[in-house]
Image (tube, rainbow, N blue to C red):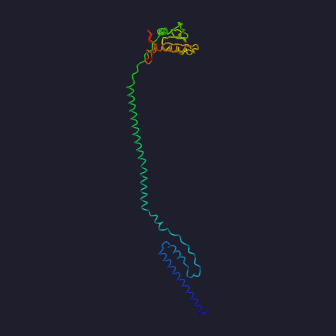
Amino acid sequence: MTDKDQKDGKSGFSLQGEIKKRKTQEMQRAIDQQRVTDPRRTSQTTNAASTAPDPRRASQTMPTVQPAAQPRRQTQTNAAVPDPRRTSQVTGITKRVTQTAAMPVIHSRRNLMIVGIATFLAVMVLGGTFLLARSSVNTSTPTPTPMSVLPTVSANDVVNYLRQANVPISNLRQLPVDSAAWLATEEIQFDIQRSGGKATFLVLSYASPDRAISDDFRAKANAKFKDWQITPISNILVFTSPDAAPDIKTEMGSHLTSYLLAPYRPFLPTPTAQPATLGTAAATP
């Protein structure tokens, strides 16, 4: 190689390096300009500058510049700053929650007061009603009078009363009292007969109504008087035969009521006349 060729080679190598150097300076100015105009790409520009090709290797292929991670935006950074409007909203919600929590306490107190007043009024009304009812009972209810005792009569007194009342008595028989069967002191049997009907009666008289009640239970357990109608009145027992005519049974019952009950019980009627002699009064009602 001649000296000229060597000079040309040296001069050519210097020209290419100058060109690459200028390109690198232009790229650096462009990067600086972009950094000033767009601050979000500062990191990208810095990375691009760090990865700029070496001027001595301009002939080689430039490597691909990888984009750097984008920094958080201004809006995201600003979101961390509390908004005064939201702060006021949160404060209002907190006040509402506090008021809502206090409402049940107030309502419960009011409910207790209402229940207490209602209970007091109910007690007062009930007490007044009770006092009025008691006073009305005391003023309107008459004092009960003691019931008069029923008379103690004999079986013969009953027959005499029926004769005075014009009852057609027939077949009258004075029977001896069987002390083993009865506690009675007197026993009389007779018939009453009217047109179209007949009835047989057995009248037993006792010293006291208690003995009559005792024989009443004994007679109802006796098979002989199973179908007979037994009526206890005061100190007597009246047995009515099973074949007695209904109208005669009704007449006999009316006469006994008028004789032994109606004069001593004002609420009972007295359809028949009073007998001349009623006997002695019983010891118990």
Q: Quadrant of the N terminus?
A: bottom right
Q: Is residue 152 above or below residue 110?
A: above
Viewed as shown, does residue 120 lie left or right of 167? left
96 is higher (above) or lower (below) than 256: below
Rendering coords of residue 90 (x, y %): 43, 57
Residue 159 % position (x, y): 49, 9
Picture coordinates of residue 38 (x, y %)?
48, 73
Q: Is residue 270 left or right of residue 67?
A: left
| View extreme (front): residue | 195
Taking depth in this image into account, of 232 and 246 the one nearest to the observer is 246
Q: State the residue in front, 198 or 78.
A: 198
What x and y, as percent, mark residue 257? Answer: 47, 15
Displayed quadrant of residue 246: top right
The C terminus: image quadrant: top left
Which of 94 and 59 lies nearest the eye of the viewer? 94
In the picture as drawn, the residue positioned furthest to the right comes out as 1
Count of numbered circles on the image: 0
